Amino acid sequence: MIISDLLAMEATGCRLIAGSEGINREILWAHSCELPDPYRWLGQNELLMTIGHCVPNDAQEQVEFIRRLERAGLCGVVVEDNDLAPQLHPEALETANHLGLPVMLMKRAVPFASIVRMVAAANKSNQAQQLMTLNHLYRAALGEYEHPSGFAQQLESVFKVAMTAVDVATGVDVLPGSLTVDSSEIKKLASEVLPYGQGMINRMGSLRGGELSVWSLPTQRSTVLLVEESPGSMLDSFTMTHLSQVIAGEVNRRTHTALGLAHQRRHLLPDSLESSTPQDRLVRDATQLGQPVQDLMVAITSTNNEELVFSSLSLAGIAHASHIQNGYYASLVRSADLPVLQSLSEYHGIGIGISPTITNLGGVKDGLLRAQVAYESSDGPKTGIVRYDEVSFSLAPKSESQAKEIVERVLGPLRQAGSSEQSLIDTLCAYLDENRNWIETSAKLGIHRQTLSYRIGRIEQLTGRNLKSSKDLAELWIARIALKRS
């Protein structure tokens, strides 16, 4: 049924007063609504019927009202011709003409129910199609999918739409489908999402000139569902209610699972930094929790970003072990996860230092130090991805004179230590080269651990630097690089 069919039926008592170019719009269903924001509750190709309570009085507010109905995808609006309804201003009617949104007045003696019955009779076959669609929806909800996008893609095929569900706080696609949305579009929606618990499902509006409809979902975290419809799609307010509940349930399940597992993995990072932790036990624990143990890297950022990074990596499906270490927030991830970190950095404008690739868990300690060097390499605001492989060359002295200057500034006190000068410098170099492993450093130098402990204490005393501090270690590491050039 289309608008012109409705106008042709004398029993409806409707006459067109604006939007004549839209008389071929399909009427999927007709709803009576007197709420001040009916465009939040009605969907694509649905007809709004009102006695006028939802229509604003002001001319400019009426113009915006018409625009919002159009953006929501409604096929038209029927206003009862009574004394209570506000007078429709010429500006509003001109806007309806420009948009091609049919605006109709209905005789007061005609009940809304008669229009609903006419639309229902015309769309009887559509109701059967709705039931079949819902059957496919709930069968899809019970299915099992190997790929994270499999669930959304199945729903897309059922409703003939493209969609994606996005966690607004992180910008992560928590239920990725075939629809790609720019980060700027998500940021635009961030302030409009209803907090969890306010209503069931809320139509927030649209993007891209009405091509995408945006829905706020009743999920544990603020989440939006973005939908792009295509010709023949079976999506109205009735089916949308069912679809949103299914998607909200799946989003909540994935969120709970991802965050819970990530919390269980947190101890793996500090455990991998402890030389006393047996490697076989560490590998076993990591494997049981789904944490990769090869081709890894360490990412460093400010502790202010702890919740943001933890949630973003978890919701993106990244297996990570994250923990606060030496005043920084560190994450152990796969090298292949770098693109996710880049997206995270760009979306939120945060700085992240990245270590070189670590072959196994035994290299985490060294990776943490190098990620720290990368993060601290910039004197300005900490933004963007900084890779150790890229900054180590710029940190390294570019000339012999520059190398001598760095060595003198950081290691100068050791050079003034008299006869013990060379032994302290050799000890520091060995300690750094062996990833601060006391047993391996002692063996390399051929000294007892007590002697090593004494020398480490002297190095800290003379240089004024704490070898347990990531910042001080970074400075000593740069000096170690410079020493090779001087």
Image (cartoon, rainbow, N blue to C red):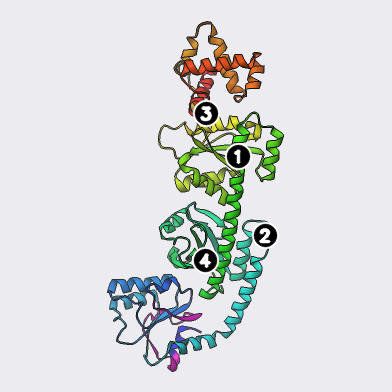
Q: Say what amino acid the circle numbered 1 marks.
A: His
Q: Nearer the viewer, residue 2 or 321?
A: 321
Q: In whole angstroms, how far apart are the C-alphas of marks 2 and 4?
A: 23 Å
Q: Say what amino acid the circle numbered 4 marks.
A: Glu
Q: Secondary structure at mark 1?
A: loop
Q: Secondary structure at mark 3?
A: helix
Q: In whole angstroms, how far apart are the C-alphas of marks 3 and 1?
A: 29 Å
Q: In whole angstroms, how far apart are the C-alphas of marks 3 and 4?
A: 46 Å
Q: Residue 145 shows which numbered tag?
A: 2
Among the two numbered marks 3 and 4 on one chain, the one whose residue lies closer to the N terminus: 4
Among the two numbered marks 4 and 1 on one chain, the one whose residue lies closer to the N terminus: 4
Q: Secondary structure at mark 2?
A: loop
Task: Please rate how many residues cluster around mark 1, counting C-alpha atoms within 10 Å: few if below 14, some from 14 to 19, many from 20.
Answer: some
Among the two numbered marks 2 and 3 on one chain, the one whose residue lies closer to the N terminus: 2
Residue 82 is one of the magenta-drawn residues = no
Among the two numbered marks 2 and 4 on one chain, the one whose residue lies closer to the N terminus: 2
Camera-side mark, 2 or 3: 2
Residue located beneath label 3 in the image: 392
**Residue at (47%, 82%) from the top-left corner?**
30
Q: Nearer the viewer, residue 438 or 26?
A: 438
Q: List x then y, in percent, for residue 442.
A: 64, 17
For the residues labelled 3 and 1, say whether their Cβ atoms are less than 8 Å apart: no
Q: Say what amino acid the circle numbered 2 marks.
A: Tyr
Task: Please rate how many residues cluster around mark 3, counting C-alpha atoms within 10 Å: few if below 14, some from 14 to 19, many from 20.
Answer: some
Residue 19 is one of the magenta-drawn residues = yes
